[in-house]
Image (cartoon, rainbow, N blue to C red):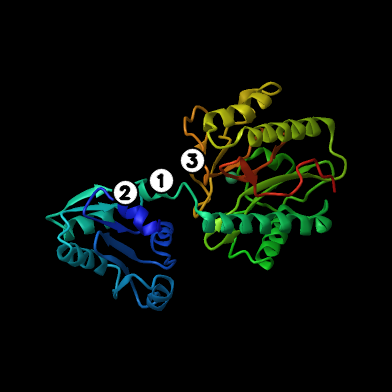
Amino acid sequence: MSHLDAFLNALQADAALVHRPENLHWISGFTGEGMLFVSRDRHVIVTDSRYTEQARRQAPDWELVMVAADRAYPAVAARLAGEAKADSILLETDYLTYDGYRSFAEALPGAELKSLAGVPEALREIKDEAELASIRRAAKIASDALMNILPRLHAGLTERQAQIMLEFEMLNLGSEGVAFDTIAAAGINGALPHAVPSDHVIQNGELLTLDFGATIDGYRSDMTRTIGFGSVGAELRELYETVRVAQQAGVDALGPGAVCGDVDKACRDIIQAKYPAEVFGHSTGHGVGLYIHEQPRVSSGSATVLRPGHVVTVEPGIYIPGLGGCRIEDTVIITAEGIVDTIDAPKHLIEL
Ligand SMILES: [Mn+2]
């Protein structure tokens, strides 16, 4: 079934207006800016002259309406809704601004406006073969990029230099861009799960956490590896080994029919056997696709059951202020038979 057909099947109204770029992409194939108008009988891309040729190429089966300015969108929506006799219309209330929503409400005074929030996102949870192929390519680029830069990584570089090296390598290997802001955190900065790379100079005896991903056809990969420099002391070595065992337990708990909350527990139990609960404050993982963070969440108590086509990360970590931190993360595809771990970079402690 095409993505458009899947969207139409899920449509609980006469028509929908779609604005979120990732949802435009998923439903129509068009990756520019604009709006979709979708009803049973009509599917229209509304955009401006910067994107009309692109829309023709990427979505040849879609009707195209050109607008000259942002304020024209509500009027076009009203015209299309009138032509389609659409009395009920869905909008992305979780994406439009308050002013944006109001301008559509004013242009569509007779229509019943309802929320489309979460509907395209739920449809996008299960990936098809083409989507999985893109994610696997993005994952391979990220893994290869890390392995390629290892011989050039050494104590004395800054976190930012490590970040730039890694991003350059991913782009060089064919990534469309970075999947999200790369995290490179060494020494005590490793205790910040979402540290911003700084001019901190990596020292011997420190761990460096690198969390990064590549993008192919808009689809992202997500991976984290933590690397040691010089000889890493016993306390950090123990911390690393605990995360490695926890991460492997999480990956081993994945599969069709696995419950997300159980996967989280598999990781968390191992860490909590040795450390206080607060060292691992975030959830174990998340879905990955056109967004870097999407459904399903692999979190404590989640009853979501994994199915073939789900793509989730497993990324436990330990963060201790004043000491440092470690995280290890893979992006994993759930299949009918089991799993495919898309990240093939090694997970033992590498000391450079
Ligand atoms: Mn992640």
- Between label 1 and label 2, give the one nearer the viewer: 2
Residues tagged 3 and 2 counted as in contact (Cβ below 8 A): no
Answer yes or no: is residue 270 visible: yes
Q: Are marks 1 and 2 in contact (CB under 8 Å)?
A: yes
What residue lies at 39% left-to-right and 67% top-to-bottom?
A: 33
Q: Earlier in the sequence, mark 1 or mark 3?
A: 1
**Disc 1 residue lies near ligand 1 with CB under 8 A:** no
> Which residue in the structure is indicated by mark 3?
296
Residue in the image at 72% along x and 58% along y:
145
Residue under numbered circle 1 = 122
Q: Position of residue 34 (x, y in %)?
A: 35, 66
Q: Which mark is residue 54?
A: none
Measure the alpha-carbon separation of dots 3 and 2. Answer: 18 Å
Q: Is 299 rendered above or below residue 82?
A: above
Q: Position of residue 42 (x, y in %)?
A: 25, 65
Q: On screen, 268 above or below 170? A: above
Check the image and report above or below for 226 versus 290: above
Among the two numbered marks 1 and 2 on one chain, the one whose residue lies closer to the N terminus: 2
Q: Secondary structure at mark 3?
A: strand
- The image shows residue 225 at horizontal and vertical percentages of 71, 45
Could you classify mark 2 by the number of other residues whose Cα lies within 10 Å: few (under 14), some (14-19), or many (20 or more)? few
Mark toward the viewer: 3 or 2: 2
Question: Of marks 3 and 2, which one's residue comes earlier in the chain?
Answer: 2
Residue 10: mark: 2
The residue located at (80%, 55%) in the rendering is 150
| Cα distance between the residues tagged 1 and 3 | 9 Å
**Mark 1 vs mark 2, CA separation in Å:** 10 Å
**Quadrant assignment for the N terminus:** bottom left
Q: Position of residue 87 (x, y in %)?
A: 15, 54
**Which amino acid is tagged 1?**
Ala
Q: Is mark 2 within 8 Å of ligand 1?
A: no
Instruction: Left or right? Give the position of 63 relative to 332.
Output: left
